[in-house]
Image (spheres, rainbow, N blue to C red):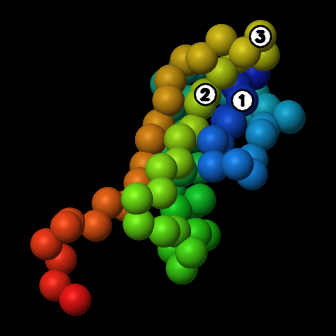
Amino acid sequence: MALFFFHVQDGRAQDFDGVELPDIDAARKEAVRFAGYLIQQAAETFRPDELWSMRVCNERGARYMTLEFSVIDDPFMPA
């Protein structure tokens, strides 16, 4: 088991506890699930052109992956 940290870069969530998971594949799946949960929770307040990212790191801070998610309105969207 390894300890993985999921840091959300939207100005509000630094992971200080981490999660023990068997490997990087399990960490990737957990990151996608967690990102989906965050998006669901922020559905009413997620602003257009707002970018969130999540860094998945080990206990020494080495980054394994980054997930990015945003809402980008089409400039030709009807009013």
Distance in Å between CA atoms under marks 1 and 3: 10 Å
Between residue 25 and residue 18, name the one nearer to us. Answer: 18
Furthest residue toward bottom: 79
Between residue 2 and residue 69, name the one nearer to us. Answer: 69
Q: Amino acid at mark 1?
A: Phe
- Label 3 crowd bin: few (<14), some (14–19), many (20+), radius 10 Å: few
Camera sees residue 20: yes
Residue 23, image quadrant: top right
Q: In the rendered structure, are the residues bearing label 2 and label 1 in contact, judged by CB atoms less than 8 Å apart? A: yes
- Label 2 crowd bin: few (<14), some (14–19), many (20+), radius 10 Å: many
Q: Secondary structure at mark 3?
A: loop
Distance in Å between CA atoms under marks 3 and 2: 11 Å
Q: Secondary structure at mark 1?
A: strand
Residue 54 drawn at (x, y percent): 57, 38
Q: Residue at x 18, y 77 (%)?
A: 77
Mark closer to the chain start, 2 or 1: 1
- The residue that mark 3 highlights is 60
Residue 19, image quadrant: top right
Q: Residue at x 44, y 41 (%)?
A: 68
In the image, residue 75 sits, relative to residue 58, either above or below, namely below
- The residue that mark 2 highlights is 56
Mark closer to the chain start, 1 or 3: 1
Residue 64, image quadrant: top right
Q: Which mark is residue 31?
A: none
Q: Which mark is residue 5?
A: 1
